[in-house]
Image (tube, grey):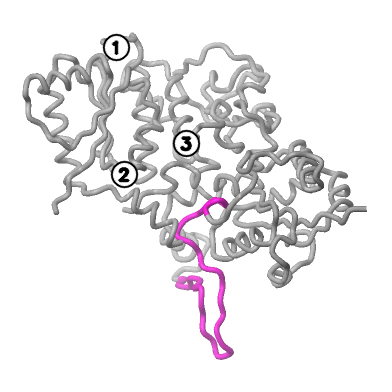
Amino acid sequence: MSFEPKIVSFLCNWCSYTGADLAGTSRIHYSPNVRVIRVMCTARIDPTFVIMALEEGADGVLICGCHPGDCHYTEGNYKTMRRYPLLKKLLADYGIDDARVRLEWVSASEGQRFADLVNDMTERVRELGPSTIRPALQSDAVER
Amino acid sequence: MPEKLQIAKYWGAGCGGCDVSLLDTNEFILDIAAAADIRFWPIAVDGKYADLEAMQDGELDVAFYNGAVRNSENEHIAKLLRQKSKIMVAYGSCAHLGGIPGLANFASKAEIFDRAYLHNPSLEAGNKVVPQPVTTIAAGELTIPSFYKRVYKLDDVVDVDYYLPGCPPAPAQIKPVVQLLVAVLTGKAEAPPKGSVVGASDVAVCEDCPRKREEKKIKKFYRPWQIIQDPERCLLEQGIPCAGIVTRSGCGVRCPNTNMPCRGCYGPLPNVVDQGAKFVSALASIIDSKDPEEIERIIGDIPDIGGLSYRFGLPASLLQRRAEQ
């Protein structure tokens, strides 16, 4: 059986979720590999969420929020803009491939962009292959 | 006259500072010796593994295990102590969270062996001797403990009743914990719920820190030696990464009080899943910039975010170790 990546996507309610919704109402076809979690703002995405998604077996994590300057809460996406690079640095220490976690800005009118992003991310993660994190942690408990 | 309490203390993968911390309770150690028989404590009293093996199950009242679990010997003793003791206490950061030795989980066993035994400036050139768990000589087989592929915290290998955090635990906290355990075992106090963190509080170090807090907005991160700091003001506000904001208090704010940032040894706050992830979140949030390039530059001031975030708790983090390459 071919490998189908599992991608967890955190979408901000105001721009990106609406953008994803637009992709749907516009009948744009895109990879079904993405599992969407709606949050009120990307600033709500604690780095713990991303790490936990990877720990629970996600092969990739896609975070989408309003373009800088467009945040419904004025400053929320700037918080994400600061946290994300530091989180990526941490994930690099864990040996997690750069392409597995990604942050993009998607507005409410960018349905096509959202669909393209999901397709692109799915293909890149497919090339990387399944994440080894979960099986490795399970084996640690048995085989020292 | 009730019989004396039977206690044991063991040093796993750690520095031995936890053993010293018990002695740092000063004259209280005499009270411990008066109230308890120290049946096993490799650093301080005589006692062989065979003596421990010969004990009956549950014969010991309390076992304090300090250090992480790095090899088969650590695991063997941890399991023996668990079997022989009524109460098992994870003593100090290494037993609680994996501690400093836990940082080895950012490297593989092969890399560690290569660094320690094959490619190290202090080795004789061309050294090829690497320790083996089993060596056969004319007289028979010689064995040493086998080195595990990663570091484990104590509760990864045995059931733990209580956690006493700290690197090392503050002497002011050790005393009441020992007194509490004595009271519990003699039926004079109710036992804390199993799995409790004892000898610590439920609030962040910041709550107890006397430094003045104003606004947290910084343009640069400094390592402690790169800046002459204001001794009155919050270290984070001066750009020094201080983990007090994501760390359980109870230590007596030892580090910030001596002008050093908190490193997080008391572990995550209650209900926090991953201390390092919270630290990343907190540190990034105080950066005062909306320009991605400037943000990158400011973040570049932190040379080792993994080591900084998980200085004492990598094996207790969600991902626990570096992924296989």
Q: Between tags 2 and 1, which lies in front? A: 2
Q: Could you tell me which residue is drawn at 71 percent across and 60 percent down?
A: B58
- For image coordinates 40% across by 25% down, the residue present is B298
Locate residue B192, reporting x and y percent.
68, 39
Image-quadrant location for residue A46: top left
Q: Which residue is mark 1?
A: A71
| Crowdedness near tag 2: few (<14), some (14–19) or many (≥20) residues, C-alpha within 10 Å | some
A83 sits to left or right of B117: left
> Image check: B142 left or right of A51?
right
Provide residue B253's location: percent of width, then percent of height: 67, 29
Which residue is more in the foreground, A45 or A27?
A27
The residue depicted at 14 percent of the width and 54 percent of the height is A1
Query: Dot 1, crowdedness within 10 Å: few (<14), some or many (≥20)?
Result: many
Q: Give the mark, 2 or 1, whose residue is nearer the N terminus.
A: 2
Marking on residue B296: none
Badge 3 local density, few (<14 within 10 Å), some, or many (20+)? many
Where is B252 relative to B63, above or below?
A: above
Q: Is residue B142 magenta?
A: yes
At label 3, the amino acid type is Asp
- Identify the secondary structure beneath mark 2: loop
Q: Are marks 2 and 1 on the same chain?
A: yes
| Residue indicated by mark 3 | B274
Position in image of residue A100 (x %, y %): 26, 39
Residue underneath mark 2: A57
Q: Is residue B225 visible?
A: no
Q: CA distance from mark 2 to mark 3?
A: 17 Å
Point out the stretch of residues depicted in magenta. B127-156
How far is the residue under mark 2 from the one under mark 1?
30 Å
Q: Are marks 2 and 3 on the same chain?
A: no
Res B67 visible: yes
